[in-house]
Image: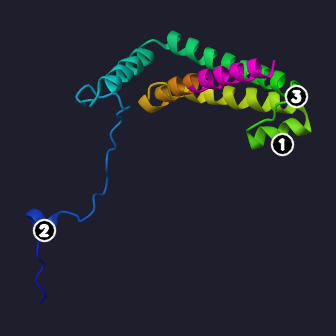
Amino acid sequence: MEEVRVLRGPERRRATPFFVVRERRSGFERRSRRRSRLAAELDTTLVYLRDHPATLAVLLILGNMLSLADLAFTQVSLSLGAAEANPLMRHVLAAHPAYAAVLKIGVVMALSLVIWRFRRRRRIVGLAVYLVAFYCLVVAYELVGVGRLL
């Protein structure tokens, strides 16, 4: 007759866990240390935007308005003889300027909706800040370009 052995202790444990509970952290950890003052200020800003959805909504609206300003200054630059630097938009503008407007408005609006939907995540709120900063730089660049063309 064969002996049946009952496992106890560490021998009984599985090599791989059967059920793993994932953490639901959103990236906003109070315990984490930031290395620089700039990173600490950015973190403070992101926490403020997370806790004040109306301010985040205004930031997203500002991003959409800057996108429209980018589109308007691009049209002015093109009418003054400049060339579009973005190869995708160059192709769409060659087809029809209205298609470019619909594409630009649609992409930025979709990105704004994604940011709004996942606004409790630190990286997503950071994306909203970078979106507005990016469009501020683009509009400033186009203002300088239009000024030089005039």
For the N terminus, the image quarter is: bottom left
For the C terminus, the image quarter is: top right
Q: Residue furthest bottom?
A: 1
Residue 114: percent from left, percent from top: 59, 30
Which amino acid, by three-letter code, is at mark 2?
Glu
Query: What residue is disc 1 on?
Result: 91
Looking at the image, is 29 positioned above or below residue 48?
Answer: below
Q: Name the disc covering residue 98, or none.
A: 3
Q: Give the range drawn in magenta.
A: 134-150
Q: Which of 78 and 148 is in front in this view?
A: 148
Q: Which of 104 and 113 is in front in this view?
A: 104
Q: Counting residues from the N terminus, which is met first, the one under dot 2 or under dot 3?
A: 2
Write down the quadrant of residue 13 in the picture: bottom left
Task: Give the CA distance from mark 2 to mark 1.
Answer: 65 Å
Task: Give the CA distance from mark 2 to mark 3.
Answer: 69 Å
Task: Give the CA distance from mark 3 to mark 1.
Answer: 12 Å
